[in-house]
Image (tube, grey):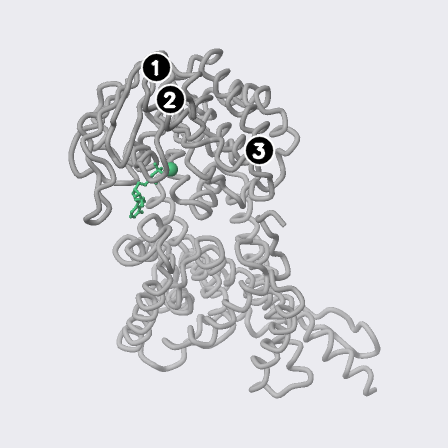
Amino acid sequence: MLEVTNLSVSYGGLRALTDVTLSVKEGQFVTVVGPNGAGKTTLFKTISGIVPAASGQITFMGENLFGLHPARRAHLGIAHVPEGRQVFKTLTVLENLEMGAYPQAGQRAWHHTLDRIHTLFPILAERATQLAGTLSGGEQQMVAIGRGLACAPRLLMLDEPSMGLAPAVADTIFERVSQIHKEDGVTILLVEQRVAEALELSDHGYVLETGRMVLDGPYETLLQDDRVRKSYLGLS
Amino acid sequence: MDLEVLIENVLNALAAGITIGCIYGLMCIGLGLIFGIMKIVNFAQGELLMLGMFSSLYLVTGGGILAFMGPYIGPFVGALLAGPIVFAGGCLLHKFLIARVSGLRTAGSLDEGHFGQLIVTLGISLILQNGGLILFGSSPMTVRTPLASSAIEVGPIYGDATVFLNKARMISCAIAIIVAVSLYLVLEYTRMGKALRAAADNPTAATYMGIDTDKVYRLAFGLGCGITAIAGGLMATYLSFGPFVGLDYVIIMYSGVVLGGMGSILGAFWGGLTVGFVQQCSALILPPQLQNAAIFVVFLLIVLLRPQGLFGRSAERA
Ligand SMILES: Nc1ncnc2c1ncn2[C@@H]1O[C@H](COP(=O)(O)OP(=O)(O)O)[C@@H](O)[C@H]1O
Ligand SMILES: [Mg+2]
């Protein structure tokens, strides 16, 4: 579904990603883990077309993404739930969700998806007319995920959805993401620093360190890797 | 007797304040879109007002294509048509100049592109003023309509005290309100309007939603230009203007927008209304040279007491 091949990205002269290759198949739950500054957000931004690539290729459902205007990606069914939530603060919660449904597919499925979003996150129904900027961090994250779901995505990309949240709230978020994957059949690409929880949910994991993919494999394989156990899971 | 004169003066100042205030309100909405919502510093906004005035003038008078409509309807249709004309100009301006210093291109940069916008729009403003001087000449113009010199008389209300409602201003005021309300409804309730607000709020996230922010920004900038131009066309029916008329109004527009509260279309309208109202009512007690000073005293007072503006609301968590 999503194929990233030998991707390199630089900011000015600074290399952020080197020769990164990653593949997400339809229906999979794929997680990318790695320390701060590894280039995870850069990878997402490049997929979304916000940051230009130096070399390499990205295709989605066989279509080369580099030839496309950044805004076209949502219309293809790629939803990007960005790092730091990035909700529309001056819009109401409902308007935020409506903006998620901006692409045609989202508009057609609107009534159904809105119900679904409200089932997953009942608080968003209660807060429908409140400005999104006035919500708590956890609620804003729910808006951001709901907004992503509203475009009826084929691929949902989530960039550190648990960042800055209390453990209990983060658990709820993980549970909902898992539900979205299992019950709605949405393909998931997740970036997380809560490695244990994230890998547990996923079919396939990648480890990104200082711009390079150093390791990848199914959950079970990663769990047995010494480096992953030591650096990311705190096991010996 | 003295009381009658006083009452008459006060009532007439109130009436003038409200009618002119509504037209100022529309004028401020144009800047409210560009500065308040899109956060683009535009010092050429006064010149857009001027272009609206001259567009209407050339449409309506002499061999203009609206000349057949006559002096009663023509000037108002001309004012409305100045909107699309300046809208188109604004879109081009945005495409070739403003887009380079705003939107996604400067999102997240240190100054959000404000320095660039300041210089670019000041330059545009100078070019338009001097270009206007070459093209239109310096003699004062007005879009003549007999309605400007006739009034509806209300009263006598108290003794002989009568309110005179200038017909040109009344019609302009009504048109201003209709245009303002329509724009408000479009921004508040249509998909396009919401996309515009979303793109202004967070261009990066809006792009993730599939919104082509460049296009939306261009449309918004054009709309802001066109709205102010319509206000210009309306004002042209009752005041005389030249290529430098924008200088008098750009400050009024900024005070109106800030007074009303950044980021709110209704706020910009009320801000403009307040400014017009204060300006007209100050004529009761102050000489004309001090009317703009009165605006700023009220402006400073309100900003002192309510820094977020009359209608600003905070979208940040307290
Ligand atoms: N806009 C930018 N300009 C310059 N360097 C950047 C920019 N964004 C990120 N970087 C750098 O790129 C590297 C990767 O950052 P990022 O993708 O945010 O990492 P992660 O999301 O894994 O924490 C870091 O070294 C960071 O400093
Ligand atoms: Mg990151």
Residue located 68% across and 70% down the image? B15
Q: Which residue is mark 3?
A: A166
Dot 1 falls on a residue whose secondary structure is helix
Disc nearer the start of the sequence (2/3): 3
Mark 1 closeness class: few <14, some 14–19, many ≥20 residues within 10 Å: few
Q: Which residue is mark 2?
A: A229
Amino acid type for the residue under numbered disc 1:
Gln
Amino acid type for the residue under numbered disc 3:
Ala
Disc nearer the start of the sequence (1/3): 3
Q: Is residue A56 visible?
A: yes
Pointers 1 and 2 in contact (CB under 8 A)? Answer: yes
Chain assignment, label 2: A
Find ligand 1 in the image and state its quadrant: top left
Q: Which residue is mark 1?
A: A224
Residue A190 place in picture, x, y as percent: 39, 25
Residue A107 place in picture, x, y as percent: 45, 25
